[in-house]
């Protein structure tokens, strides 16, 4: 199935219309929407910046449920030698299911039309639902671990934590992702801050667990959230240094990593 068909079906399934945005009023609306998603009085990307990025050849894609803005995503090009795009920011209303997938598929169509072969972005490795979306839904691969990438953040989702990120890289013409990797037969190793297993090994695979809801935990117990940050950081930085890549995330919060030569 080609990218345009997948994008059209994803939009229909989510109940939204997805289109490129290029007028000043709608760009301002997208900027305000991002501030709502990140629960901050300041716009993560001001309207003027968004307009400049769009004018420079980037894309602003918005999803509408009727007249309501349900989600938006922003992308720019990486260096031409790679012919890749970088997704700067993407967000959806929490009540809208399937909108994120529709937006990413629309970004994919735009990128392929512009000659790109891959797309990259960063995400918080402790947010399991985002990791699952990136790895299991889209088929992206985690390629590097970035410690405290943004420095201190003061938005309503990340305040009080360190801003570690993992880079996801999506090969835009790749086949659909494989099924989840099972933990059956794996040997458990390290212990997580909650007293349950943190890591497991089987053959050439490494598994690492994240908390069920880091945003809720961060608000309820910041010290526990920071303990999780440091525990997962220790595992993933060591794994990436050995050449491993993240290739999956299970529904119950276990990353799957595999060595580069496997």
Image: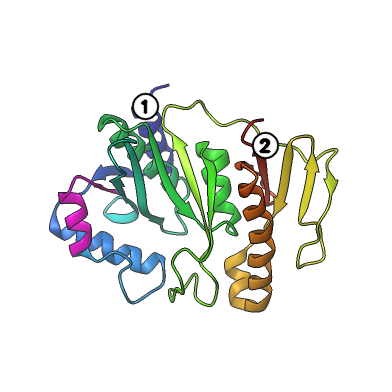
CA neighbours of label 2 inside 10 A, class few (<14), some (14 to 19), many (20+): some
Closer to the N terminus: mark 2 or mark 1? 1
Which mark is in front, 2 or 1?
Answer: 2
Picture residue at 32% right of the left edge, 33% below the top = 116
User: Is residue 179 shown left or right of residue 9?
Assistant: right
Label 1 neighbour load within 10 Å: few <14, some 14-19, many 20+: few
Which dot marks residue 229? none
Q: Nearer the viewer, residue 245 or 37?
A: 245
Residue 180 image label:
2
Q: Residue at x 50, y 70 (%)?
A: 158
Q: Which colour style is shown?
A: rainbow
How far apart in space, not on screen, are marks 2 and 1 (Cα)? 25 Å
Seen in the picture, residue 141 relative to 115 is either above or below; the reply is below
- Left or right? Give the position of 155 relative to 27: right
Position of residue 146 measured from the top left corner of the image (x, y, whole percent): 51, 58
Instruction: Please tell me which residue is depicted at 40% across the width and 30% down the height of the picture.
Output: 6
The residue to which callout 1 is attached is 5
Task: Look at the image and give the residue range highlighted in magenta.
Answer: 48-61
Q: Quadrant of residue 223?
A: bottom right
Which of these two is toward me, 244 or 29? Answer: 244
Res 92 seen here: yes
Residue 167 horizontal/vertical position (percent):
49, 49
Q: Which quadrant does the C terminus fall into?
A: top right
* Quarter of the image where the N terminus is located: top left
Marks 2 & 1, CB-CB < 8 Å contact? no
| Residue for point 37% across, 31% down | 117
């Amino acid at each position: 199935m080609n990218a345009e068909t997948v994008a059209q079906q994803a939009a229909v399934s989510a109940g939204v219309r997805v289109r490129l945005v290029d007028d000043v009023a709608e760009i301002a609306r997208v900027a305000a929407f991002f501030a709502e998603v990140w629960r901050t009085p300041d716009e993560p990307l001001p309207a003027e910046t968004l307009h400049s990025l769009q004018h420079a050849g980037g894309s602003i894609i918005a999803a509408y449920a009727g007249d309501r803005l349900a989600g938006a995503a922003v992308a720019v090009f990486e260096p031409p030698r790679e012919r890749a795009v970088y997704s700067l920011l993407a967000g959806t209303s929490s009540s809208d299911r399937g909108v994120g997938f529709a937006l990413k598929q629309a970004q994919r169509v735009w990128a392929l039309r512009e000659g790109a072969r891959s797309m990259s972005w960063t995400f918080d490795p402790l947010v399991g639902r985002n990791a699952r979306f990136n790895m299991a839904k889209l088929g992206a691969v985690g390629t590097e671990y970035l410690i405290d990438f943004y420095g201190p953040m003061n938005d309503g989702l990340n305040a009080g934590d360190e801003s570690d990120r993992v880079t996801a890289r999506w090969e835009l013409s790749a086949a659909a992702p494989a099924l989840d990797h099972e933990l059956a037969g794996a040997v458990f190793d390290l212990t997580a801050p909650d007293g349950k297993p943190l890591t497991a090994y089987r053959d050439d695979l490494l598994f690492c667990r994240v908390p069920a809801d880091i945003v809720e935990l961060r608000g309820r117990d910041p010290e526990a959230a920071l303990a999780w940050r440091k525990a997962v950081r220790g595992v993933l930085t060591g794994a990436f240094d050995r050449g491993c890549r993240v290739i999956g995330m299970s529904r119950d919060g276990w990353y799957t990593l595999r060595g580069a030569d496997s």
